[in-house]
Amino acid sequence: MLIYDQLKRDHEKLKSMMNRLEATTGRAVKTRMELLQELKTLLLAHTKAEEAVFYRTILSDDSTCDQALESLDEHKSAEAALAEIEDTDPKSDAWLQRFKFFKRSLEHHFEEEEKDLFKKARKIVSRDEAEELGDIFQELRIEVIEDLGT
């Protein structure tokens, strides 16, 4: 599967998880925290594999370097926001407000990648290379999930 399809598939899974999380209430603390942990695991696996495979490839080209660097910064911001959410009382309104901000930011990041960065990357990454990157991404993503589970 092409790297773009792999990444987009993860984006859709993450969006679905975020929608489920956003629908929880402060009374469903256990559910909220379990979903947040699942989201964190998938997000970290996605970003680590994406950075190692996709961004490493596109950072070397002038047409994609700036946007790739911006996206790397957005990954760091997302991880920091997630840590803030984890440190907030899951029963509080502040938790939900922080989560909603995190969700909007992440959805914006996905949209920029899918509508702009992927388009630019397709011009510099051959279809065969994109297929190979997709395979490597999937393998690394699974490794990261397994590492996070232990």
Image (cartoon, helix red, strand yellow):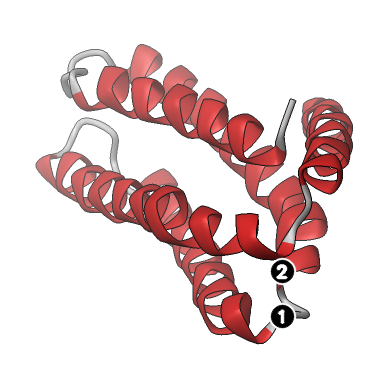
Measuring 85% from the left and 47% from the top, which residue is drawn there?
A: 129
Q: Which residue is mark 1?
A: 61
Q: Nearer the viewer, residue 146 or 108?
A: 108
**Label 1 Cα crowd, 10 Å radius (few <14 / some 14-19 / many 20+):** few
x and y percent of residue 78 in the render? 45, 58
Residue 50 seen in render: yes
Residue shown at the point (50%, 56%) measured from the top left: 119
Q: Identify which amino acid the numbered label 1 is placed on.
A: Asp
Image quarter of residue 56: bottom right
Tell me where residue 16 sits by quadrant. Answer: top left
Residue 19 drawn at (x, y percent): 26, 23
Give how far across and how far down residue 135 sits, in percent. Answer: 86, 31
**Mark 2 — residue?**
58
Judged left or right of residue 51, residue 19 is: left
Q: Check if mark 2's residue and mark 1's residue have beta carbons within 8 Å.
A: yes
Closer to us: 112 or 30:
112
Residue type of the residue flagged with mark 2: Ile
Helix, strand or loop at disc 2? helix
Q: Is residue 41 visible?
A: no
Q: Decide: is 50 above or below 149.
A: below
The CA distance from mark 2 to mark 1 is 6 Å
Q: Which residue is pictured at 10% across the width and 41% down the height? A: 93
Frontmost residue, 73 versus 86: 73
Q: Residue at x 78, y 80 (%)?
A: 60
